[in-house]
Amino acid sequence: MRMLYFIVQLLFLPYVILFLFSNNKSVINQDLYARIRVMHTGFKLGYDLTLELFISRYFRTWGLFLKLLRIFYTKHPTFIIDTCLEFVGGVHLAHSYATILNAIKIGNNLYINHLVTIGDNAIVVAGAVVVKDVPVNMLVAGNAARIIKST
């Protein structure tokens, strides 16, 4: 099993190189360690990065080099993030498939599981745990999220 993972690490080496030259290192670190409170450095950071890439196929960066890498390392076709979405660090995606992020703004430490749809113009209060679809034009809060009012 270790030999297989070593081969996988080699396949994601271009992403590690891209990370080393990225201006977004702090945000990528926040995403990478969103659910783990111990941030690593050096080779352990590279190990964590390649493992997360292997599991989620999600890497937050932009530019020409990423577009070239996408030729060889494709994202899942059902994983969509709106290009106008403003979001900060700490994003953790349980699955990078069957996920559509179509929002205006998302705050810190967002965890998104698969197969949960948030409706158009919905507002989800910080700390809410959304376990089912949110209707259009609704404000939800709580654990599990409940409709508070119409927006």
Image (cartoon, rainbow, N blue to C red):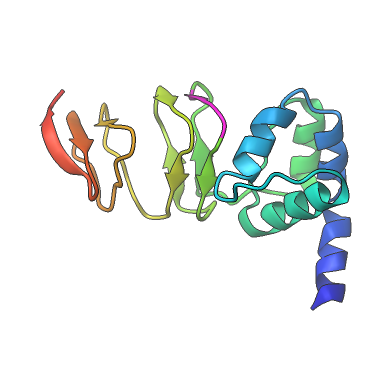
| In the image, residue 66 above or below residue 116 | above
Q: Give the range drawn in magenta.
A: 85-89
The spot of residue 57 in percent (x, y) is 65, 51
Residue 86 included in the magenta stretch of the image:
yes
Please state if 130 lies on the left or on the right of 85 as rendered.
left
If the image is split into quadrants, where does the C terminus sit? top left
Q: Going 70% across and 52% down the picture, which residue do you hit?
A: 53
For the residue pair 84 and 21, the one nearer the viewer reads as 21
The spot of residue 127 in percent (x, y) is 33, 39
Please tell me whether the stretch drawn in magenta is mainly helix, strand or loop.
loop
Please state if 68 lies on the left or on the right of 134 as rendered.
right
Please state if 16 lies on the left or on the right of 26 as rendered.
right
Residue 61 included in the magenta stretch of the image:
no
| In the image, residue 51 above or below residue 147 | below
Residue 6 in view, yes or no: yes
Q: Going 86% across and 34% down the picture, which residue do you hit?
A: 20
Q: Going 14% across and 38% down the picture, which residue do you hit?
A: 147
Q: Going 87% across and 74% down the picture, which residue do you hit?
A: 3
Residue 136 in view, yes or no: no
